[in-house]
Image: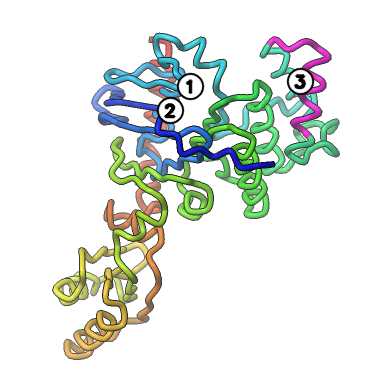
Amino acid sequence: MPDTRSESTQPIVSARGVVVRFGDLTALDHVDLDVQPGSIYGLLGPNGAGKTTLIRVLATLLKPDEGSATVAGFDVVDQAPATRTKIGLAGQFAAIDEYQTGRENVEMIGRLYRLGRKQARVRTDEILEAIGLTDAADRQVGTYSGGMRRRLDLAASLVGRPEVMFLDEPTTGIDPRSRLGVWELVNDLVAGGTTVLLTTQYLEEADQLADRIGVIDKGTIISEGTARELKATLGGSIIVVEAPVEDLDRYHDLLQPIAEGEIAVDRQQGHVRIPATEGPDTLFAVTTAMADAGLHPTDVDTHKPTLDDVFLSLTDETVEEEAAHDEDETQREIAAATGKAGR
């Protein structure tokens, strides 16, 4: 099947100045976003950053306090019913009935889309085959693995043939093999003409799937570009110096004058990351400075910049570290959104 990814300059998803507040918490702070048709846009950030809130706004489940957004040409507030005919949504948790079979779950969604009984059966068979669940279609969902449930949830979201698919952390809680299966399904969706906006905490997932990536932190998109563009902002190489946590500030102060950019201190992992545009020359200067200062690091390594390096340089925290800090905030955000959606 030909790849239909488009270079159109007319976005199929657009947000301008979107603000969402829950009491004293600003979950989204003047967010601007454009997603081109036929592409995969990855929204990368930790728990509590505002990813789920933005998906809820775009999926017409939550009204923003300020700003506007359109999906497939429809305003998500003023034309919410029309918007819903163009979208599919798979949230963080599989919304399926464990007591029904896989086939019954998908057919039920088809009937909710007002497909006739025969049409719903035909569409269900098509989808189950596409996601590789035909053999398990007549088994009760309670017997499915986590990866199978996730695929079934995605299948149910595809019944209406959406132009835009919102995937909120589609691979959270599933094993690596199932994650690869979901990635393949997402790519197949886009090859068939669907535009995908997905949120993720997994740096590798954004790197593998997304045509463009927006890094969101504390309700603001702080950087955007292709994976290559984001990595290029850090230069040619990254030097990682591993040392005892109590010595990291000393390493930072010693090596900052040598670095071609800001050094990032990762206290959780116990190392400092040093941008090294000059590669070997910077590495030589770093090792010489440490030796002259009598510092003996546990390890020194170099690698090409990754999205992890990008995120750390932008936020001064790793994704995993901030995710742990913000777990309670995320629960507040979701609970508040539930009460606010019908406003």
Q: Residue 265 location in percent, x, y?
A: 27, 64
Q: Residue 277 location in percent, x, y?
A: 27, 71
Judge whether residue 248 is colored magenta.
Answer: no
- Name the quarter where the C terminus is drawn: top left
Comparing marks 3 and 2, which lies closer to the viewer? Answer: 2
- Element class at badge 2: strand
Q: Which kind of residue does numbered mark 3 sit on?
A: Glu
Q: Which kind of residue does numbered mark 2 sit on?
A: Val
Q: Earlier in the sequence, mark 3 or mark 1?
A: 1
Q: CA distance from mark 2 to mark 1?
A: 6 Å
Comparing marks 3 and 1, which lies closer to the viewer? Answer: 1
Mark 3 and mark 2 in contact? Answer it, CB < 8 Å: no
Residue at 40 percent across and 15 percent down: it is 75
Magenta region: 114-128
Label 2, on which residue? 13
Q: CA distance from mark 3 to mark 1?
A: 26 Å
Q: Nearer the viewer, residue 59 or 171?
A: 59
Residue 72 is labelled as 1
- Element class at badge 1: loop
Q: CA distance from mark 3 to mark 2?
A: 29 Å
Label 3 CA crowd tier, 10 Å (few <14, some 14–19, many 20+): many
Label 3, on which residue? 107
Q: Nearer the viewer, residue 89 or 237?
A: 237
Residue 176 is labelled as none
Q: Quadrant of residue 221?
A: top left
Q: Earlier in the sequence, mark 2 or mark 1?
A: 2
Mainly helix, strand or loop, the magenta region? helix
Residue at 20 percent across and 72 percent down: it is 259
Mark 2 and mark 1 in contact? Answer it, CB < 8 Å: yes
In-image side of 291 versus 140 (left or right): left
In-image side of 203 versus 99 (left or right): left
